[in-house]
Image: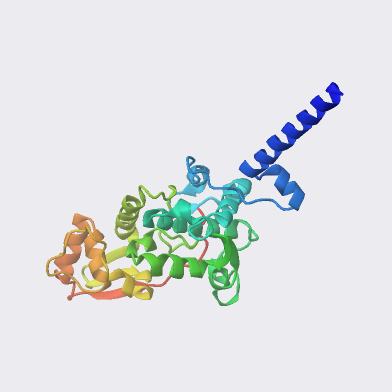
Amino acid sequence: MFVITRVRASLTTLSLVFAAHLADAPSAFAQSASGMRAPPPLAPSADPYRGYEALLRAVVRGRGVDYTALRARIGELRAFCEWLAANGPTATPAAFNSAPSRLAYWLNAYNATVLRAIAESPPTMRNVMQAAPNSGFFRARTHRVDGRSITLDAIENREVRERFQDARVHAALNCGAQSCPPLSSQAFRARTVQAQLDRLATAWINGGAVTLDASARVLRVSSLFQWFSADFTRVPAGRPAVSGGAQGPMRFVQSYAAPALRASIEAACGVDLSRCRVEHVAYDWSLNEAR
């Protein structure tokens, strides 16, 4: 009788411990019982972008991406995209309770989703605009991000441009095309995203997005300044004021041009750039394969 009583007590204790374990960590047992895999949780003390950044550093080559190397490590990219699918400002709002954290999330989400979509396409795909009819690569194909299905076009225009109204994001979003601003080898993070955007905008403006033909008085700029002209009329706070400078998108150019480039432009075009004609360079949608 004593033995039976001890066994019953032990079983009762074990049941209580097991129940408490399930309440605190509804993981392996709960998943097997339901037959479904629970989404990976966001660990507050961990950096969810660390592995993604290591991958970027391994595959970004200058202005392009080594897609052969990326395909060889596709498991790492898929793992990060699975995390993006389960976490985000809507799916796990407590983890993204500041504007910088949400901006960093969506910039990373866009770029990682583009990378995965290209890496999982046939290697014969050489142009993102021709990957699907009617710009379907961006506007029709959906991806699981932030607990929902969403297109790349919606991420760019609804989640990034509309919400944050910051023209610098155009230097941070990489669409997988040769004419897109180069993909950064650094992941975006809440504490550094503002400095990262400034650095990328400066590098983009001074790295070929704007060129001057002084003799012809022609300023050739990326087509992004035409497509998103309203965005570029808003120069981010903290940038030096351009006294008597250009209006519209060219204000952004003046604000981020390095001293030598800005001096050359203003010498040929005037401080307000009115003496120059602006031409928008045709966009090259061919794949940004590293060369």
Q: Position of residue 111 (x, y in %)?
A: 49, 57
User: Is 260 or 10 nearer to us in this picture?
Assistant: 10
Q: Quadrant of residue 116?
A: bottom right
Please, which residue is most extreme toward the right here?
1
Q: Position of residue 176 (x, y in %)?
A: 50, 61
Q: Is residue 221 above or below residue 81?
A: below
Q: Could you tell whether 126 is left or right of 242 in the image?
A: right
Quadrant holding the N terminus: top right
Q: Position of residue 269 (x, y in %)?
A: 17, 70
Residue drawn at (41%, 72%), measured in percent from left and top? 282
Residue drawn at (47%, 40%), measured in percent from left and top? 45
Q: Is residue 262 above or below residue 30?
A: below
Residue drawn at (22%, 64%), measured in percent from left and top? 254
Q: Quadrant of residue 203?
A: bottom left
Q: Could you tell whether 166 is left or right of 186 in the image?
A: left
Query: How many numbered badges does the structure rendering display?
Result: 0
Please, which residue is most extreme toward the front here?
1
Asked if one can make out residue 291 in the rendered structure from this viewpoint, the answer is no
| Coloring basis for residues | rainbow
Q: Could you tell whether 100 is left or right of 95 in the image?
A: left
User: Is 160 or 69 nearer to us in this picture?
Assistant: 160
User: Is 237 or 94 nearer to us in this picture?
Assistant: 94
Asked if one can make out residue 166 in the rendered structure from this viewpoint, the answer is yes
Q: Position of residue 22 (x, y in %)?
A: 67, 42
Please, which residue is most extreme toward the top here?
2
Residue drawn at (20%, 65%), measured in percent from left and top? 265
